[in-house]
Amino acid sequence: MVAATSATPADQGSEIERFCSNIADAARDRRYMLQAQELETLRADIDKRMQALDQKRVEYEEWLKRRNDFLASAEDGVVKIYARMKPDAAAERLAEVSPELAAAILMKLDSRQAGVILNEMERTSAATLTGIMASAARKVDPT
């Protein structure tokens, strides 16, 4: 028994190396298995998120279609209302709404009517609306 415990450090080192080399394949296989499980869990999570994203996209497309349909029907009525107003009254009302909406209405009006309404507006408001209309008329997005 004494001989078994009195191994030299070189013998112990080679024994450790043999042990490590014997379990290296098993450890590597276990590590790969754990990584594969983690990847599968991540894949399942991504698939679930993609399904939720697809559902949100469908909801958004439905909402956008309803919104565009409403805007198309309401737009003509609003433009007709402003087309029939006196220019000074139209200028006063357009100064109270958002600049984007006012510019959109003016762009739908006959150019002569829009010019008369812009002429009745305050100079800074008219310049702002003109800038918005010019930007909207560009074919290429400046950003």
Image (cartoon, grey):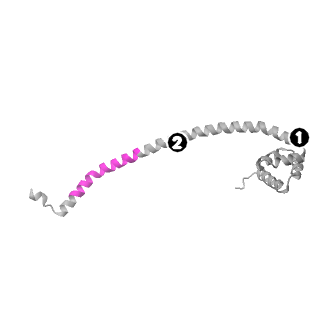
Q: Residue 76 location in percent, x, y? A: 81, 38
Q: Amino acid at mark 2?
A: Arg
CA separation in Å, label 1 and label 2 = 52 Å
Label 1, residues with CA under 10 Å away: few <14, some 14-19, many ≥20: few
Which is nearer the eye, 39 or 126? 126
Magenta residue check for 33: yes
In the image, the segment drawn in magenta is: 15-37
Q: Position of residue 83 (x, y in %)?
A: 87, 42
Magenta span includes 9: no
* Residue in front for this viewpoint, 75 or 30: 75
97 horizontally vs 4: left or right: right
Q: Position of residue 70 (x, y in %)?
A: 74, 36
Question: What amino acid is found at the position of numbered circle 1 in the picture?
Answer: Arg
Tell me the residue at 36%/45% (across/down): 33
Q: Residue at x 82, y 44 (%)?
A: 108
Between circles 1 and 2, the one closer to the viewer is: 1
In this orientation, which residue lies closer to the viewer: 16 or 116?
Answer: 116
Residue pictured at 77% horizontal, 53% vertical:
135
SS at circle 1: helix
> Which of marks 2 and 1 precedes in the sequence?
2
Residue 38 — which label?
A: none
Q: Name the residue located 73 percent from the left edge and 36 percent from the top edge.
A: 69
Which quadrant holds the C terminus?
bottom right
Residue that label 1 marks: 84
Residue 15, horizontal then vertical, whole percent: 20, 57
Up-down relation of residue 62 to residue 105 (above or below): above
Residue at numbered disc 2: 49
